[in-house]
Image (cartoon, coloured by chain):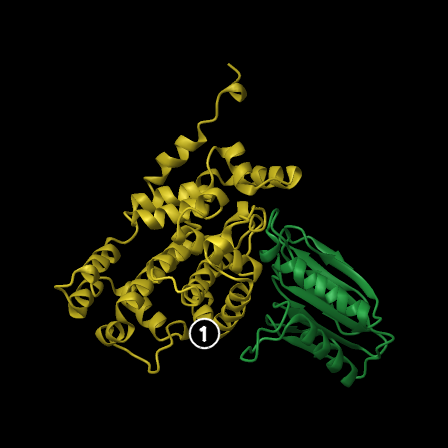
Chain colours: A yellow, B green
Amino acid sequence: MNTALCPDFTLEAVYESMVALPVFPKIVHKAMSVLDDSQKNISDVAKIIKLDNGLVANILKLTNSAMFGLSQQVSDLETALALLGQNRIREVLIASAAMPYLSRDLHGYEMSPQDLCYHSIGCAMISEVVSHRLEFPHSSELFTAAILHDIGKIVLDIYVGPRLMEVLDRSRRQESDFATAEWEVIGTDHAVAGSSILQQWEFPRDICRAVRAHHDPDLYIQNRLSAMLAFCNIIAVQLGIGVGADSFRYRLSDQLLYVLDCSQKDYYDCLEESVRALDEAKDVIRLIFG
Amino acid sequence: MHEVFVNRASIAVSSESSTMITAKSLGSTLAVVATDPGARVAGIAQCVLPVTQGRQSKLPGVLEQMRDLFKHMIQKGASAQDMKIMLFGAATFIHEPKELALGVELYKRAVQALKKNGLILGGEHVGGPLNRSVSIEVGSPRARVILADKKEIFV
């Protein structure tokens, strides 16, 4: 039997393999649910986080970095949490827990571990700027989606890594959209894979949907969180923040700025404020990259 | 070799020998590279904004940055006649609406400014879905472009 003629079930293989990936720390989800509970307070959140020393250390490091703009250095968890406030706590938790997943080499996307980490952190910082500028009320959800939007690249690189070079070749030769080339070669794309893993990790549906849509111009204009995530990713790529071989190989929606009610001036303001935010956050970037 | 890195929306100019000026991962931003090999002066402006955003803006537009770059080059001993000017970066998505076409807008304004001032564009590697880094060594007439796959091109 000529196996070359057999259908390629890579998609199924990828999804089966995803079950074997380490799960996102349960402690983070537990702490987030306590944050949502009006009957609980910061001490209750701290009690849960204290169960994970690594998480505590990361939270203190990140809290003391310029990314979170505190006026004083803090050394104990409860003070850090009290100073940060609810939304910031969510962001620090997600950033701390996501970092170990994001520090990987992605040969198939021609990205170093620093590139993906820098892109994810940069995109999250840009999300803060864009949320503020465009008065988006769900900035915390956008931050989470921005940190984790390319998690599918890790999954695909681990399980179908060698075939990603074929994807890149095909995209270059045909000058086609990278996601289309991913579908043609491996039967899925990193946005779909990322969304699937976030569902397995029990992230809210809106965040999974935004991650699923972030390169699909027809999908991301259908709801604001998805459109905001796509916009943040575009700005990060345009500013050269952790750019991979695929980053510019996508089609952008002609309606994106209209859907976001974002004028040309707002867009340039977002670019300007993003450059400033990234510049001010040099120490957190140094902290992450050593 | 001493390497000086240019930040986004800033410039770096040097007349020190054995110095390399580098703008990394340009994305859609535009690197305006100027070199006067005879005078041994080189510089890069990494431009982010096509125009300066109102009075409260802290970041300059592409024209202000080019003016600043040439002023610093001349202050360091370069001559306007002998200066070679090159453009790099300005990457584009495979389809992008006009209002999000940052690279195209930066490039267009830079070329217009050069023409208006009678300056000749000495070389370029711009546009397309390619992320680039660019370096220029003080005293060299050529810039080195590095693409995402580590391929090097000299312009």
Q: Is residue A200 above or below residue B109?
A: above
Residue A149 appears left or right of B54: left
Residue A160 in sight from this viewpoint: yes
| Relative image position of residue B138 (x, y in whole percent) | 76, 74
Which residue sits at x=37%, y=37%?
A: A17
Q: Position of residue B19 (x, y in %)?
A: 71, 75
Residue A14 as seen in the image, left or right of residue A164: left
| Image quadrant in which you'd find residue A124 | bottom left
Q: In this rendered view, identify the residue nearer to me: A55 or B109.
A: B109
Mark 1 residue crowding within 10 angstroms, few (<14) / some (14–19) / many (20+) = some
Q: Residue furthest top?
A: A1
Which is nearer the eye, B138 or B59? B59
* Residue marked by disc 1: A283
Image location of residue A268, percent across then percent down: 55, 66
Seen from this angle, which residue lies furthest left? A39
Q: Look at the numbered disc 1 and give the secondary structure of its residue.
A: helix
Quarter of the image holding residue B22?
bottom right
Residue at the spot 59% in from the left edge and 51% down from the top edge:
B97
- A100 sits to left or right of A4: left
Q: Can you say whether A24 is above or below B65 in the image?
A: above
Identified at 74% across, 56% down, the residue is: B153
Q: Looking at numbered disc 1 in the image, what kind of residue is underneath it? A: Asp
- Would residue B16 be seen by someone viewing this image from the given angle? no
> Whole-percent x and y of residue A190?
46, 43
Camera-side residue of A108 and A214: A214
Indicate whether A118 appears above or below B51.
above
The subunit letter for the residue under badge 1 reads A
Residue for point 38% across, 54% down? A145
